[in-house]
Image: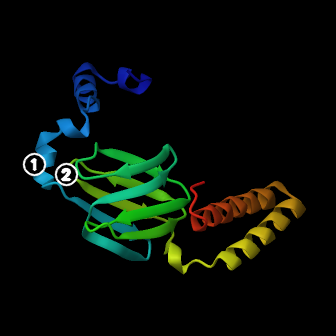
Amino acid sequence: MSLFVRALNPAVRRTAVRLANRGYASETTTAAAASGGKLIVNFALPHQTVLKNHEVHQVDMAAVSGDLGVLSDHVPTIEQLKPGVLDIIGEGGASTKYFVSGGFAIMNPNSVLNINAVEAFKLEDLDAQSVASNLAESQRLLTNAKDEAAKEAAAIEVELYESIQAALAGKSK
């Protein structure tokens, strides 16, 4: 039991502990029946809605806790996304891949997956040569940075461009 839960009054603590005890996806029969075996995806950026109530077979994503594949009736979870590939696989097996710079994915008990990303671009729209030249420039800025703020900004750019380069090469970073 976490320190935070121990600080709650006994009635609230019992509720919190009961809610924290969750089952595996196969044990969540109520949610499974409600979803009908379909995974519904909502994918939003600050300036646009990419997908809304879109039925898919699976979504693979790069999360801070590790790579994650989500099917319908997945255990509810909240994941912080790291720079990497978001692969949305349709019912027929067709795949649409996006490069996501970061964000959050929230899997609800009713098989609705909400993905909120800071930036996302279709992988096919990214240019490998532009990525390579921007990576080289970012590495140069990192090497020549005079203060900590400039070093940190350049390091973030280097990490981002390395992640994009890995995604374009078909490897996850």
Left or right side of 142 for 159:
left
Q: Tag count in the figure? A: 2
Q: Residues within 10 Å of mark 2 (few under 14, many from 20)?
A: many
Snapshot quadrant of residue 151: bottom right
- Residue type pointed to by label 2: Asn
**Quadrant of the drawing holding the C terminus:** bottom right
Q: Is residue 74 above or below residue 101?
A: above
- The residue drawn where x is 51% and y is 77% is 124
- Residue type pointed to by label 1: Ala
Q: Residues within 10 Å of mark 1 (few under 14, many from 20)?
A: few
**Quadrant of the drawing holding the N terminus:** top left
Left or right side of 94 for 86:
right
Q: Report how far apart the C-alphas of labels 2 and 1 lie in the structure.
A: 9 Å
Disc on the earlier residue, 2 or 1: 1
Q: Is residue 139 above or below residue 4?
A: below
Left or right side of 50 for 14:
left
Snapshot quadrant of residue 113: bottom left
Snapshot quadrant of residue 167: bottom right
| Residue, disc 2 | 110
Q: Are marks 2 and 1 in contact (CB under 8 Å)?
A: no
Colouring: rainbow
